Image: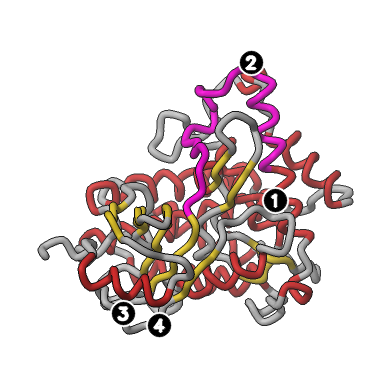
């Protein structure tokens, strides 16, 4: 097989039947085009539809692509109000496809890619979709990690300091050319690192619109997907990460709301969205908000640089989509640098 992402169905079929509860009669495996990190496949069988999510082939960065962590957190959250797919099976490292994977139940519904929500029935539905995202994020951060067996899912305390060190290191490890905006952003973040305030929650790490499945005919989230970057951390990281979209252009590949008339569409402002989250979690407000936003731009730019580097090495999940990510990383770094310039 020339495509490193193509799976050997003949070898995989008996393995799935032996290990996935109720699985029988493999018919087809089709790779989803979306996603740049862990390749994901629709598995159709006589027993139903499933999703298989695997580590990518090739050399991988340490601590990246941990599909076992994704499986574990979804399994744990099944007993909470946070909507997740049913996690069915986690393989060992040695498998018929040569790398670790997990299998979860396929969830029917809508994935919405444009935060302007052009497919919505009207302003009321747009507003309800944003409210559902806000409520789900607050519910996630209200989960007690100890009560769901995730007390050891990360190191509590000094979250932003540790994440800054991690992503600076991964950015340097995948750097292909200097980005002046990143060189301004990195020292600013280091200088303005807030003191640890003791807040710890389960964080998703990639909380955005297109990592959710909505019910087909109502603004209700039926599944929150892509838990690869989840850990114990600071809840403001998820909130700020999602709020980047209010500053991104809708014309960019990472569609945002920066040049959209939000009021005309029934979409809340960034300030309204943050205020709704604070009300749900009993917070008076959020200090140091510019830092959390700037950190989010830095972190996603570092992730984008890693995707681009993997494309050059030939093991990105979708190479055709990965190569333009170099420009996206530049845009993110520029927006982060602009924010710190405005903040001073």
Residue stretch in magenta:
106-133
In contact (CB < 8 Å): disc 1 and disc 4:
no
Q: Position of residue 73 (x, y in %)?
A: 60, 69
Query: Where, by quadrant of the figure, is residue 117 drawn?
Result: top right
User: Which quadrant holds residue 13?
Assistant: bottom left
- In three-dimensional space, the C-alpha distance between marks 3 and 4, rounded to whole angstroms, equals 7 Å
Q: Name which residue lies at 25% across and 50% down.
A: 323
Instruction: Please report contact status of discs 1 and 3: CB closer than 8 Å, yes or no.
Output: no
In the picture, the disc for residue 312 is none
> To which residue does mark 1 refer?
137
Q: Secondary structure at mark 2?
A: helix
Where residue 106 sits in the image (x, y, percent)?
47, 52
Which labelled disc corresponds to residue 95?
3
Instruction: Give the secondary structure at mark 4.
Output: loop
| Local crowd size for mark 3, using a 10 Å CA cut-off: few (<14), some (14–19), many (≥20) | few
Q: Which sits earlier in the primary sequence, circle 4 or circle 2?
A: 4
Asked if the residues shown at circle 3 and circle 4 are in contact, with their CB atoms under 8 angstroms apart, the answer is yes
Q: Tell me if residue 90 can be seen.
A: yes
Quadrant of the rendering where the N terminus is positioned = bottom left
Q: Neighbour class for label 4 at 10 Å: few (<14), some, many (≥20)?
A: few
Near-viewer residue (97 or 88): 88
Residue beneath the point at 73% across and 66% down: 201
Q: Circle 1 sits in a helix, a strand or a loop, which is it?
A: helix
Badge 2: residue crowd in 10 Å (few <14, some 14–19, many ≥20): few
Circle 2 is placed at which residue position?
264
Q: Height in image: 17 above or below 245?
A: below
Task: Please check the rendered image and state whether residue 296 is part of the magenta-colored stretch, yes or no.
Answer: no
Q: Nearer the viewer, mark 2 or mark 3?
A: 3
- Marked residue nearer the N-terminal end (2 or 1): 1
- Above or below residue 285? Residue 57 is below
CA–CA distance between discs 2 and 3?
52 Å
Q: Determine which residue is flagged by label 4.
A: 92
């Amino acid at each position: 097989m020339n495509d490193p992402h193509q799976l050997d169905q003949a070898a995989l079929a008996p393995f799935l039947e032996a290990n996935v509860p109720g699985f029988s009669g493999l018919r087809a495996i089709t790779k989803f085009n979306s996603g740049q990190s862990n390749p994901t496949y629709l598995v159709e069988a006589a027993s139903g539809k499933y999703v298989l999510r695997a580590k990518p082939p090739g050399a991988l960065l340490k601590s990246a692509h941990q599909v076992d962590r994704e499986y574990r957190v979804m399994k744990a959250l099944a007993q909470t109000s946070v909507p997740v797919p049913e996690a069915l099976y986690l393989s060992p490292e040695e498998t018929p496809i040569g790398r670790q994977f997990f299998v979860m139940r396929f969830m029917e519904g809508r994935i919405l890619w444009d935060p302007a929500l052009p497919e919505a029935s009207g302003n009321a539905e747009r507003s309800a979709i944003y409210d559902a995202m806000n409520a789900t994020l607050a519910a996630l951060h209200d989960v007690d990690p100890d009560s769901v067996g995730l007390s050891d899912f990360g190191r509590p305390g000094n979250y932003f300091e540790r994440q800054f060190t991690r992503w600076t290191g991964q950015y340097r490890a995948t750097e292909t050319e200097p980005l002046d905006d990143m060189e301004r952003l990195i020292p600013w973040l280091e200088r303005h690192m807030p003191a640890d305030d003791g807040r710890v929650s389960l964080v998703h790490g990639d909380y955005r619109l297109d990592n959710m499945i909505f019910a087909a005919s109502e603004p209700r989230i039926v599944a929150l997907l892509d838990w690869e970057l989840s850990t114990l951390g600071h809840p403001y990281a998820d909130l700020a990460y999602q709020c980047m979209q209010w500053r991104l252009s809708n014309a960019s590949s990472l569609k945002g709301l920066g040049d959209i008339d939000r009021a005309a569409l029934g979409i809340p402002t960034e300030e309204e969205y943050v205020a709704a989250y604070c009300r749900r979690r009993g917070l008076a407000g959020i200090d140091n908000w510019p830092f959390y936003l700037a950190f989010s731009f830095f972190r996603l730019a570092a992730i984008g640089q890693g995707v681009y580097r993997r494309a050059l090495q030939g093991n990105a999940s979708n190479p055709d989509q990965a190569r333009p990510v170099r420009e996206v990383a530049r845009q993110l770094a520029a927006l982060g640098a602009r924010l710190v310039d405005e903040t001073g």
